[in-house]
Amino acid sequence: MKILVCISKTPDTTAKISFTQNNTKFASDGVQWIINPYDEWYALVRAIELKEKDPSTVLHLLTVGLADTEPIIRKALAIGGDEAIRVNADSADPFYIATQIADIARQGGYDLIFTGKETIDYNGSSIGGMVSELLDWPYISLAVKFDLNGSVATVVREIEGGEETDEVSLPLVVSCQKGVAEQRIPNMKGIMSARTKPLKVVEPVAAEALTGIVSFELPPAKAGVRLVPADNPAELIRLLHEEAKVF
Amino acid sequence: MSVLIFIDHSEGQVKKASLEACSYGAALAGQLNVPAEGILLGTVTTDLSTLGKYGVKKIHQAAQEGLNHLDAQVYAKIIADSATATGATVIVFSNNLSGKAVAPRVAARLKAGLVSGAVALPDTTSGFVVKKNVFSGKAFAHVAINTPVKVITLNPNSYPVREGEGSVSAEVAPLSVTAGAPKVKVVSATQATGEVPLTEAELVVSGGRGLKGPENWGIIEDLAKALGAATACSRPVADAHWRPHHEHVGQTGIAIAPNLYIAIGISGAIQHLAGVNRSKVIVVVNKDPEAPFFKAADYGIVGDAFEVVPKMTEAVKKLKGIA
Ligand SMILES: Cc1cc2nc3c(=O)[nH]c(=O)nc-3n(C[C@H](O)[C@H](O)[C@H](O)COP(=O)(O)OP(=O)(O)OC[C@H]3O[C@@H](n4cnc5c(N)ncnc54)[C@H](O)[C@@H]3O)c2cc1C
Ligand SMILES: Nc1ncnc2c1ncn2[C@@H]1O[C@H](COP(=O)(O)O)[C@@H](O)[C@H]1O
């Protein structure tokens, strides 16, 4: 069994979001980078649990990013996984990234690919689906539970208005969200061993970026809160009804 | 050339998110001077010809029971084939759970540029530029799609459902498909019937750790019921199992954009705001005047939730004439 977990880096969840160069670039000065929470807490941890259950499992981590993603991928290796691959490229186009991931998946003979639900900066929720199409594999989006029995996966996924339990044979792509696993903090042993785990750097395959970010924009600032005295909640309701007209 | 709109369904019905996609797709078709057509896979009780009033001229329906469960692989092939056959240049999805499952596959299959989470109509004055949500609602990006065929997913509650003049009825054309056998076997499916899904709710009442425990959720539920609102919660509340996980909103939960979000006993951490900052009107009830949430709010009351919220409920009931 070979599992590939897709890891991306995102600004820390508390990072101040602002832009430079005439609103065309994210202002990354002083920004802390973290492993995208969905990749770290859910996709990676569930893959580690599967390996713990079946130690013959090979677990590789993959990121498409420039050299500055290496601290992030090392941190992911400290949580678990045998080795990491970095495709030396940077793109905001999901098709470009998915093409790289699909290529690695084809060459590596993986049975199972995990992604996170979405990156919390680009909010695409699209890489997993694209990779599955490029490989012509089935895709389970937004899994909340994942179990494996031999080469058959049982997955619970979120659907409109409810949940669905599916059974599917590998190979398979799954995007993971809350419920699939519980967050783990890397321990000292993990951090030490991550330093010596292999991190392979490969050059990207030729692919087109089908989209490109032209500019960014911040939402307009709020006008400021209008406070209503605590002894008059009815006045708040009146304002919501008559002034804001929200119901 | 046309704009093709994917119309999804659950519980046998076409829901609001798809109607928004229809309205958006029709407006875009108008902008591009091409017709808007829809595609629906499976069977529904909704009379599809009525979708004409949202500007959709023709709906291609593959009315096979076997297609009622959305299988991303099977769906993507049918939608992509149909887009090619009808000469669609833009394919529109809702960025709901169905759209997230299928749209990326369709885009990859057609090698069409994808922008997910659009919040406005594309700017087509020069090129094709779509405004989308990025940084979990903290910013927008304007993204150019450079391919002849384009795929867009529309964020729920970002574009109004628009009924046109009169009652134009849409032509429903049967779509015959030879869908491959799905590789995914659906073992069971559960629908939370009766409740408004949180992502579709126009009004949301949400509670945080300030409520002290699950036993106190009655005041939240009463206010929600009086308003006809859905309920939500902060992450620690879901983590402590005071409330079900699907109510958790924020950076790591779900992102919502209702017309009204009432936050009760929630401090307003940046990760919480990431999921709710697109709400049109935010109301905060918190006993701490320094709570960061007030900075993101439109209206607020500094006070004890246990005293304030029941009075809000009373006021709503009185206003609506509910005894
Ligand atoms: C990577 C990451 C991701 C995260 N993702 C999310 C997420 O998706 N969603 C999320 O919600 N959080 C998320 N968090 C957690 C977030 O940082 C906060 O810890 C959390 O939102 C706090 O929840 P709370 O406001 O309910 O509780 P608290 O911060 O404990 O706030 C309780 C509030 O209730 C008020 N209060 C107390 N008693 C009363 C009363 N009687 N009447 C009125 N008010 C009262 C207090 O003044 C206080 O402001 C994330 C954190 C991290 C690090
Ligand atoms: N640059 C990248 N390298 C590796 N995996 C990625 C990259 N970008 C996104 N992913 C994976 O795809 C998931 C969804 O990303 P997105 O479609 O951009 O929201 C993420 O949670 C990651 O698991």
Image (cartoon, coloured by chain):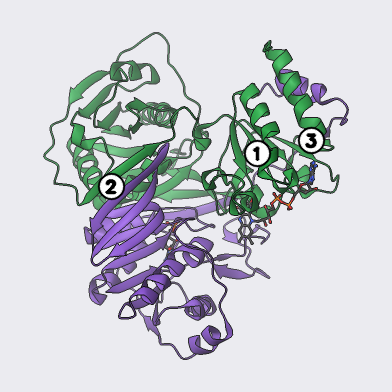
> Which chain is the one coloured green?
B
Residue shown at 29%/16% (left/top)? B49
Q: Nearer the viewer, mark 3 or mark 1?
A: 3
Left or right? Give the position of A112 relative to A81: left
- Residue extending farthest bottom: A196
Residue at x 32% of width, y 53% of height: A140
A33 vs B155: above or below: below
CA separation, marks 3 and 1? Answer: 14 Å
Q: Which residue is tagged 3?
A: B306
The quarter in which the N terminus of chain A is drawn is: bottom left
SS class of the residue under badge 3? helix
Residue B145 on image: x %, y %: 39, 49
In the foreground, B105 or A110: A110
Identify the hue of chain A. Answer: purple
Q: How far apart, in angstroms, are the residues tagged by discs 1 and 2?
A: 32 Å
The residue tagged 1 is B206
Residue B248 seen: yes
Label 1: element kind: strand
Q: Give the position of the C terminus of chain A as an image quadrant.
A: top right
**Mark 1 belongs to which amino acid?**
Ser
Mark 2 nearby-residue class (10 Å; few <14, some 14–19, many ≥20): many
- Judge: label 3 CB < 8 Å from ligand 1: yes
Q: Which mark is residue B72?
A: 2
B205 left or right of A106 in image: right
Look at discs 1 and 2 and give the one toward the viewer: 1
User: Is ligand 2 closer than 8 angstroms to the Cβ of mark 2?
Assistant: no
Structural distance between the alpha carbons of marks 3 and 2: 46 Å
- Residue displayed at 57% across by 57% down: A24
